[in-house]
Image (cartoon, rainbow, N blue to C red):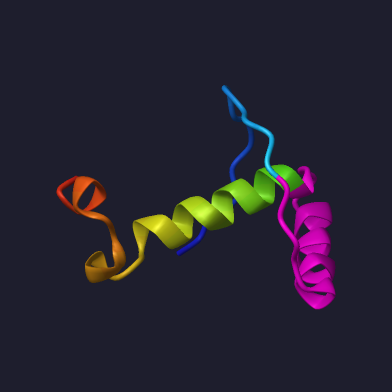
């Protein structure tokens, strides 16, 4: 289950293009949980990486168990 959290350190700036509908949904979820869109996107990406099929990971990441 995905649980929304707050707070992160050590940031790097990147630019991504996202579908408009996805951004609207993320904005709504962020607003409901009183956190920034950025923090929500970080959590979604972390969740995706933690739950990705191990065959899709590079070798240096797949040995992390």
* Quadrant where the N terminus is found in the figure: bottom left
Q: Position of residue 19 (x, y in %)?
A: 77, 73
Q: Is residue 31 above or below residue 18?
A: above
Q: Looking at this view, is 48 or 19 the one in front? A: 19
Q: Where is residue 39 in the image (x, y as percent from the top left)?
A: 67, 43
Q: Residue at the location (50% across, 60% down)? A: 2
Is 24 magenta? The answer is yes
**Can residue 3 be seen in the rendering of this structure?**
no
Q: Where is residue 17 in the image (x, y as percent from the top left)?
A: 75, 62
Q: Residue at the location (78% across, 70% down)? A: 25
Q: Give the range drawn in magenta.
A: 15-37
Task: Classify residue 12 by image quadrant.
Answer: top right
Is 11 magenta? The answer is no
Q: Is residue 29 above or below residue 61?
A: below
**Residue at the limit of the structure toward the top, as seen here:** 10
- 17 left or right of 61 in image: right
**Can residue 55 be seen in the rendering of this structure?**
yes
Q: Residue at the location (62% across, 28% down)? A: 11
**Residue at the limit of the structure toward the bottom, as seen here:** 21
Query: What secondary structure prevails in the magenta region?
Result: helix
Q: Position of residue 58 (x, y in %)?
A: 26, 55
Q: How many marks?
A: 0
Q: In this view, does 13 lie above or below 48?
A: above
Q: Residue at the location (36% across, 56% down)? A: 50
């Amino acid at each position: 289950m995905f649980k929304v959290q707050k707070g992160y350190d050590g940031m790097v700036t990147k630019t991504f293009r996202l579908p408009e509908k996805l951004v609207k949904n993320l904005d709504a979820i962020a607003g409901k949980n009183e956190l920034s869109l950025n923090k929500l996107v970080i959590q979604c990406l972390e969740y995706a990486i933690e739950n990705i099929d191990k065959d899709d990971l590079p070798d240096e990441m797949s040995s992390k168990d």
